[in-house]
Image: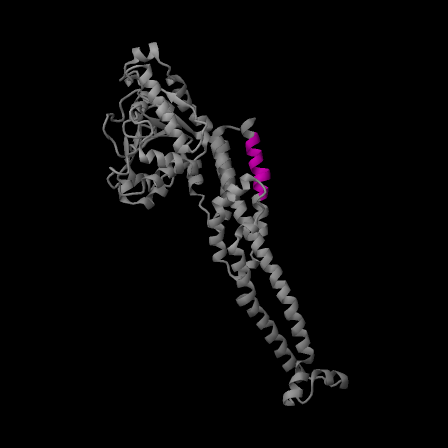
């Protein structure tokens, strides 16, 4: 199946089968839905002097982005080819209101971000099926002026959309920027897969000699180990721009991987379908474990209700049969009990009134006791250790629960006694069928 048709088919299937369940359990599917609407995306991030704009200009073959040693652009700039009939520049206020684009979710960050978001429409064939997003340079938090929006949160939203993230460093600031630390340590691991991130040290031609390059590279590796908390350092591409640097010195003396880096970036569109399926797989598994927990809780609630019901029904039947006997012995009312009426064979409607009142009152009190005591006690006990609602027999399941436990607890806190009758088991079955049948078939089609 053609990639475009397969992507449309996936989008339709998710919309029909899974989107309603995400809504039911208050989970956000917007990032996945918006990602399926549009083109493959390469996100370029790094500190202000790391060569982001220079790399983009080299990819496109023209100076579309301003470059410099000091901050030159503080906007998120989307660069793509939308056709010659579209404007050359589209402001953020238009982007966040176009339902056909994946930027609607950024509306919540307000005017400060909107005024620092722009789309540049270029006449470049490769970009008809691809977009590059240039980002504001990362800064040290101690010197940063207020951006007016949560930069890390916004960066995380762009990272979720991206099929490839290029994180750039320069030899003079090899990973010392505080926002870079926050991005590598927290934002990127939470919002994107490791396989989507490549690390680049650019401007290597500015090193005075090979010893200077080795020193800068070693510093970056050490800083990377501190930021990632890992001993195994990911591959770091070494590169430069031949248009602005001392290319003769680099080509003659130093290792560089500019060609490999470019090939990685050009190949980003081919990763889109696989990333869509990975995102669906991840988010549906998150939905599944929430649904499992809620299903187990409501199952326990129904079992407790049945236990209350058995006791209440027994008391109700007993009082229906003998409640008027007790009343007669205490108050001499009624004058004829149901039992004596049955024995005499002279039963009237009046003989059933008091027994029925006893039965209804007992059942009502049983329901009230369940709602106000039994269910509340069950809910309190469950919330005290919600992890017992699901099986955590693998590391993957434990990590999944760590991420989704707060969401589950939030749902359980809002659950009342009536909710135990909702068909959560049916929802869980739909999720399992989607994962085991539909998603599996799409992976097979992608490999074929």
Q: Quadrant of the C terminus?
A: top right
Q: Is residue 16 visible?
A: no
**In the rendered image, which quarter is residue 334 located in?**
bottom right
Q: Which residues are magenta?
A: 432-444
Between residue 303 and residue 23, name the one nearer to us. 303
**In the rendered image, which quarter is residue 71 located in?**
top left
Magenta part mainly helix, strand or loop? helix
Q: Return the x and y of residue 24 as percentages of the image width and height.
A: 49, 51
User: Does 17 sit above or below residue 363?
Assistant: above
Q: Is residue 26 visible?
A: yes
Between residue 441 and residue 322, name the one nearer to us. 322
Q: Return the x and y of residue 183 as percentages of the image width and height.
A: 37, 35
Between residue 256 and residue 113, name the one nearer to us. 256
Q: Return the x and y of residue 101 as percentages of the image width and height.
A: 37, 37
User: Does 358 sit above or below residue 180?
Assistant: below
Q: Return the x and y of residue 280 as percentages of the image width and height.
A: 50, 38
User: Does 315 sit above or below residue 58?
Assistant: below
Between residue 150 and residue 218, name the one nearer to us. 218
Q: Check the image and tell me how it is coloured.
A: one colour
**In the rendered image, which quarter is residue 242 located in?**
top left
Q: Residue at x 67, y 89 (%)?
A: 335
Residue 437 covered by magenta stretch: yes
User: Does 342 sit above or below residue 191?
Assistant: below
Position of 83 with respect to 71 (left or right) is right
Q: Residue at x 41, y 20 (%)?
A: 263
Give the mark count.
0
State the residue lying farthest toward the top: 252
Q: Residue at x 28, y 14 (%)?
A: 246
Residue 79 covered by magenta stretch: no
């Amino acid at each position: 199946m053609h990639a475009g048709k397969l992507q449309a088919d996936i989008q339709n299937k998710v919309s029909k089968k899974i989107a309603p369940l995400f809504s039911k359990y208050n989970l956000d599917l917007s990032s996945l839905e918006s990602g399926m609407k549009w083109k493959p995306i390469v996100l370029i991030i790094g500190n202000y002097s790391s060569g982001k704009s220079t790399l983009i200009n080299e990819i496109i073959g023209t100076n579309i982005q301003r470059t410099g040693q000091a901050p030159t652009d503080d906007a998120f700039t989307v660069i793509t080819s939308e056709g010659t009939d579209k404007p050359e520049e589209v402001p953020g206020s238009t982007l966040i209101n176009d339902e056909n684009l994946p930027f609607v979710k950024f509306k919540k960050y307000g005017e400060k971000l909107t005024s620092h978001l722009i789309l540049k429409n270029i006449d470049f064939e490769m970009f008809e099926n691809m977009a590059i997003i240039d980002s504001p340079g990362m800064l040290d938090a101690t010197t940063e002026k207020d951006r007016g929006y949560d930069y890390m949160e916004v960066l995380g939203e762009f990272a979720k959309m991206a099929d490839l993230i290029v994180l750039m460093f320069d030899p003079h600031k090899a990973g010392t920027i505080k926002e870079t630390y926050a991005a590598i340590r927290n934002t990127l691991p939470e919002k994107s897969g490791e396989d989507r991130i490549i690390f680049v040290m650019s401007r290597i031609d500015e090193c005075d000699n090979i010893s200077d390059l080795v020193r800068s590279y070693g510093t970056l590796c050490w800083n990377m180990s501190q930021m990632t908390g890992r001993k195994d350092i990911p591959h770091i591409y070494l590169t430069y721009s031949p248009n602005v640097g001392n290319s003769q010195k680099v080509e003659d003396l130093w290792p560089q991987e500019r060609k490999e880096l470019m090939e990685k970036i050009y190949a980003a569109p081919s990763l889109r379908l696989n990333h869509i399926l990975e995102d669906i797989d991840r988010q549906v598994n998150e939905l599944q474990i929430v649904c499992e927990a809620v299903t187990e809780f409501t199952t326990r609630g129904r079992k407790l209700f049945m236990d209350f019901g058995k006791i209440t029904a027994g008391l109700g039947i007993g009082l229906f049969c003998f409640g008027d006997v007790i009343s007669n012995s205490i108050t001499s009312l009624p004058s004829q009990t149901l039992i004596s009426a049955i024995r005499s064979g002279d039963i009237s409607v009046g003989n059933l009134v008091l027994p029925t009142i006893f039965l209804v009152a007992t059942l009502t009190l049983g329901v009230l006791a369940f709602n106000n005591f039994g269910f509340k006690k069950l809910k309190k006990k469950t919330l005290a250790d919600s992890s017992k609602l699901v099986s955590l027999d693998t590391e993957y399941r434990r990590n999944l629960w760590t991420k989704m436990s707060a969401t589950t607890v939030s749902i359980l806190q809002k659950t009342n006694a009536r909710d135990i009758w909702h068909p959560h088991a049916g929802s869980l079955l739909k999720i399992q069928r989607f994962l085991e049948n539909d998603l599996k078939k799409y992976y097979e089609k992608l490999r074929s």
